[in-house]
Image (tube, grey):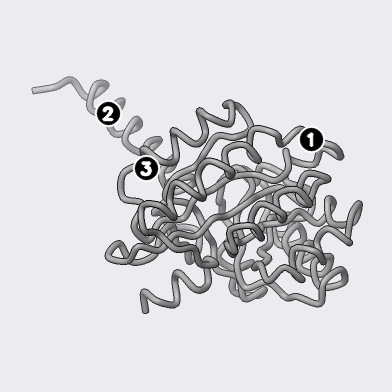
């Protein structure tokens, strides 16, 4: 028989692991409705970009236009306020815009009022700049917390995680592309990349741009087509 202290430690570790999954697990809906992929039987993929807009967003839009690829951009209110014309350019190019909070905070341990204010402010900022009212949100760093469910209900937002994340804020363009293209289960997948770096005013997103130039034609060659997150998930219902 195990000593009570060992049993208690094991229970504690399990509780910590369970909370970590609830907070950041890509398939977790503990803190609110969330999706991380579409139907696995379709050769469809959703490209998503977080943290924009930034000056590099204009070049990214050119690459997507070249291949006629729609994407979903989860934008930060503070970045939109610096460059509302870039947010409108995303809209005008036919891409989907989602809510990525106003100031890109880590929401762990934050009060429900703080969380709701962050996303409500971003909803208002996005609407002022583009006339769009998002129906999708992605939590900064993928971190959800108590208060997200109520916030999502009040603002009419569905949470979006990812099937594969490129880590393009850390890796080189070729490494990002390799990470995405070698990921299993891409059918119906949601790819997470970044056209910004948090709330930096002039981030270097060259690795992201290089990765997209590699990822998109490679996936097209494999027989995939691209959809927005809303399109991808609508097909699963």
Q: Would you say the residues marked 1 and 2 are in contact, meaning their CB atoms lie under 8 Å apart?
A: no
Q: CA distance from mark 2 to mark 3?
A: 12 Å
Horizontal relation, residue 10 to residue 94: left or right: left
| First reached walking from the N terminus: tag 2 or tag 3 | 2
> What number is the disc on residue 203?
1
| First reached walking from the N terminus: tag 1 or tag 3 | 3
Number of residues whose C-alpha sits closer than 10 Å to that of mark 2, classed few (under 14), some (14–19) or many (20 or more): few
Image quadrant where one finds the N terminus: top left
* Residue 64, x across and y down, in percent: 63, 56
Identify residue for label 3.
18
Camera-side residue of 199 and 156:
199
Camera-side residue of 103 and 116:
103
Is residue 7 shown above or below 195? Answer: above
Q: CA distance from mark 1 to mark 2?
A: 43 Å
Residue at the image point whose x is 70% and y is 46% from the top: 195
* Residue 150, x across and y down, in percent: 60, 68
Mark 1 or 3: in front is: 1
For this orientation, the residue located farthest to the left is 1
Mark 1 or 2: in front is: 1
Residue at the image point whose x is 64% and y is 44% from the top: 194
* Residue 41, x across and y down, in percent: 27, 65
Is residue 173 shown above or below 193? Answer: above
Horizontal relation, residue 33 to residue 79: left or right: left
Mark 2 or 3: in front is: 3
Image quadrant where one finds the C terminus: bottom left
> What number is the disc on residue 86?
none
Name the secondary structure under disc 2: helix
């Amino acid at each position: 028989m195990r000593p009570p202290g060992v049993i208690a430690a094991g229970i504690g570790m399990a509780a910590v692991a369970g909370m970590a999954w609830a907070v950041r697990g890509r398939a977790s809906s503990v803190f609110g409705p969330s999706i991380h992929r579409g139907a696995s039987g379709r050769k469809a993929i959703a490209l998503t970009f977080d943290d924009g807009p930034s000056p590099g967003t204009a070049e990214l839009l050119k690459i997507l236009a070249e291949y006629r690829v729609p994407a979903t951009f989860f934008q930060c209110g503070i970045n939109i306020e610096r460059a509302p014309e870039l947010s409108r350019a995303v809209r005008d190019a036919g891409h989907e815009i989602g809510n990525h909070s106003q100031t890109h905070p880590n929401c762990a341990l934050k009060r429900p009022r703080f969380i709701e204010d962050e996303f409500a402010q971003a909803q208002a900022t996005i609407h002022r700049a583009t006339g769009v009212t998002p129906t999708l949100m992605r939590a900064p760093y993928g971190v959800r917390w108590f208060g997200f469910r109520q916030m999502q209900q009040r603002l009419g937002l569905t949470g979006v995680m990812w099937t594969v994340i490129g880590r393009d804020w850390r890796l080189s363009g070729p490494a990002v592309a390799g990470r995405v293209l070698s990921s299993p289960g891409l059918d119906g997948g949601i790819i997470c990349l970044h056209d910004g770096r948090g709330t930096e005013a002039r981030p270097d997103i060259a690795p992201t741009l290089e990765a997209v130039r590699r990822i998109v034609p490679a996936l097209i060659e494999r027989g995939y087509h691209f959809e927005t997150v809303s399109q991808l998930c609508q097909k699963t219902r």
